[in-house]
Structure formats: C-alpha cells, structure tokens
Amino acid sequence: MNKIKLLEKLSNLHGAPGHEHDVVDFIRKEMNEFSCIRDSINNLYIKNKDEVESKPIVALDCHSDEVGFIVEGIKANGTISFLPLGGWHITNIPAHSVVIKNFKGEYIKGVVSSKPPHFMTIEEKARLPKMDELVIDIGTSSYEETVNLYGIEVGNPITPDVQFSYDEKIDVVRGKAFDNRLGCAIVMEILKETKNSTIDVTPVGVISSQEEVGLRGAVVAANTVKPDFAIIFEGSPADDTFKDSFSSKGAIGKGIQFRVLDAGMVSNPRVQEFVKKVATENEIKYQVIARSGGSTNGGKYHIAEKSIPTVVIGIPTRYVHTHYTYASVKDYRDAILFGKKILEKLTKETIESF
C-alpha cells in the first residue's frame, strides 16, 4: 500500500476518543509482521518481534482518536442531543454531516441541525448558538424510530462524515482526522522502513488513545513502555491562511514543525539542537513554533519516569478540529524520512547527553 493510500484508509476510519477500535484494528492488521499488543485503554504497542531488548527504547507516539461527539439523549421527535469529545468551537459544528456508530457496529448518517432562521428571534440571530441548542437529525420523526429502527443509544460515538481526496496538481490531501491519522501513518511507515535496518535503538510504535480529551492514553503508554526517548508525531494546526509569510510558522508545504513551547511542555533545548542538526544534515525543511496554548502527548512523556527526552514533530494541517483538514504530502513524506534519520542518529550516549 503506498503512502497516500495508507493515509486515505486511516483518514476515512472513525475513531472518537475512547472509541478508537476501528483505527486500532486496521493498524493491527496492516502491521501483522510486528508484535502488536492492545491495552485496556485502547493503546496499541507495535514492536519488531526480533528486536534486541538491551538497546535504548525510542517511543514513536501518535494518537488514533479524532475530535468527535457522543450521544447524550434522544428526544421525543427523534432528534439526538450530543456532547463534544475534544476541543470544538461552536461555529464549526452546525450544518455538517456526521456519522453515529451504534453498539451493533452500524453507521448511521445524520446532520447537525439547529432552529431554522425563519423561526429565530432577533436575539437568537444576533448570537452564536449554544451546544445544547444543537441536535443531530437522522431523518426520523420519533423517539421510537431513532431507537428501534436505528439502534441509537446514549453513549454512541459520533464523528464527521468526510471522504479523503488527493489533489496531485498541488500535492495536497484533504480529509478528516489528519489530527492525528497523519501521525499514525508516519509511525507505521517508519517502523516498516526500519524493520531490517541496523540501528542502535529499539523503536516502539505507540498508537495512543484519548489524546483529544486530556492526553490520557499517553499517560498509560509512557508508564508502560518506559522509553529512553520519545518522538511525538502530530497533525499540528497550520497558520498560513491567517498570518503573513513572515509571521507564519506552520505553513503547509514549508516543512515539518518543531514545537518549542505549548501549554503542556517547554522543549528541552539540547533535544531541539539535536533535531535541527539532523534535519539540516539531511536537507529536510523545518519550521519552529512557540504556542501559548494547546498541548500534545509530549506533555505527558517529558514528565514521566525520571523525565523522558521528548521531541514533538508537527505536520502542519489546516483547520484541525473541524470536519475538513488539508495537509502537504511533501511534509508527510519528510516527516517519515526525518523519523528514520533520528533513529539512525540516536545512541545510548546521545540520549544520556540530553
């Protein structure tokens, strides 16, 4: 399977926080030549079956979940109330198609609806809607139809209904959940491409769960894998559609992104110096960003155990935490190459120097 096809398959899968099963099952099948172990929180650990245990362990972390929703209740008229899973802004939710997965494993399409403007008061038209004013309409007209015909229940996960596409003219992909199926694809490719190579570390793929609701899977993963070094691959918010070329530090197609600061982590400057040197030596473009908000799984790894040296590698992605996201295929491929080069450069002595 080529790299774009792999990303397409991952993007089209549905995996709201805590309900990442379809994504995990797909990755497990694709990585069947490796040892793949799933834990109770739905993390998946991927390791070369023949790996030498004495080498330093490097976690290649990404998260499988995407921002979504969960069914809160079913109303008498058949519409469905819901709660957010992850960081949504209210303006990005109404009038979009979604998919609900019932507990039988069936997918039911619906539309996020609200009161039509024809029936709104002047006050309602002048303000943003509230979450509890939105409902999902699957076309039914009663509680009984929604529950009995479609098996909708409280607790069913909900995700955007979007199909992946690739524009070869500009080498850009569009789809849902690039935050963080991009990371999943990158980790899978790195593991495959380094499987038979001679490196001085043991890479362990960590497909972590529930990142979008508090980095929860990463807490478990860091304490389970106990890596000596961690690389976090993340679909990172692009800023090139609202900043000029000088101030933008997350433009798609302009290189992978090193994150030196966010709300959960101040990056180790020795690690930053190391990764910049590796990128420069291999002519891999990179951008550096400091953010006042947001966080990644790196926020949990770097304070786990006795402190794990950690680097966050972002792939700039437009419109994360909405239905539709854009990313550059070049950045995606460069992130895979960079991950391989990092593994080739890391040694026990290098890791201890951080």
Image (spheres, rainbow, N blue to C red):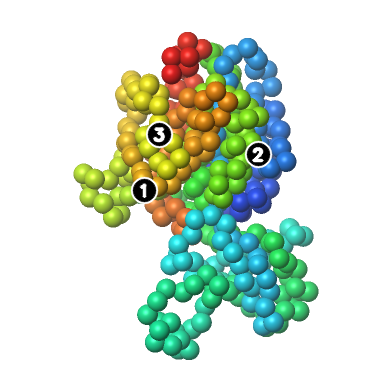
* Residue 175 coordinates in the image, percent (x, y): 48, 54
* Residue 155 coordinates in the image, percent (x, y): 69, 61
Count of marks, rendered view:
3
Q: Nearer the viewer, mark 1 or mark 3?
A: 3
**Which of disc 2 and disc 1 is earlier in sequence?**
2
Q: Are marks 1 and 3 in contact (CB under 8 Å)?
A: no
Circle 2 residues within 10 Å: few <14, some 14–19, many ≥20: many
Please state which of residues 289 and 177 is positioned toward the viewer in this rendering: 289
Q: Amino acid at mark 2?
A: Asn
Quick one: SS at disc 3? strand
Q: Could you tell whether 97 is left or right of 145 in the image?
A: left
Q: Amino acid at mark 3?
A: Val
- Residue 184 image-quadrant placement: top right
- Residue 202 image-quadrant placement: top right
Q: Amino acid at mark 1?
A: Ala
Please state which of residues 255 and 268 is positioned toward the viewer in this rendering: 268
Please state which of residues 167 and 49 is positioned toward the viewer in this rendering: 49
**Which of disc 3 and disc 1 is earlier in sequence?**
1
- For label 3, the residue is 266
* Residue 30 coordinates in the image, percent (x, y): 65, 37
* Residue 46 coordinates in the image, percent (x, y): 64, 30
Q: Residue at x 68, y 17 (%)?
A: 50
Residue 176 lies, with reference to residue 49, above or below; the image says: below
Q: CA distance from mark 1 to mark 3?
A: 20 Å
Quick one: SS at disc 2? loop
Q: Residue at x 53, y 36 (%)?
A: 300
- For label 1, the residue is 238
Circle 3 residues within 10 Å: few <14, some 14–19, many ≥20: some
- Residue 91 image-quadrant placement: bottom left
Q: CA distance from mark 3 to mark 2?
A: 25 Å
- For label 2, the residue is 43
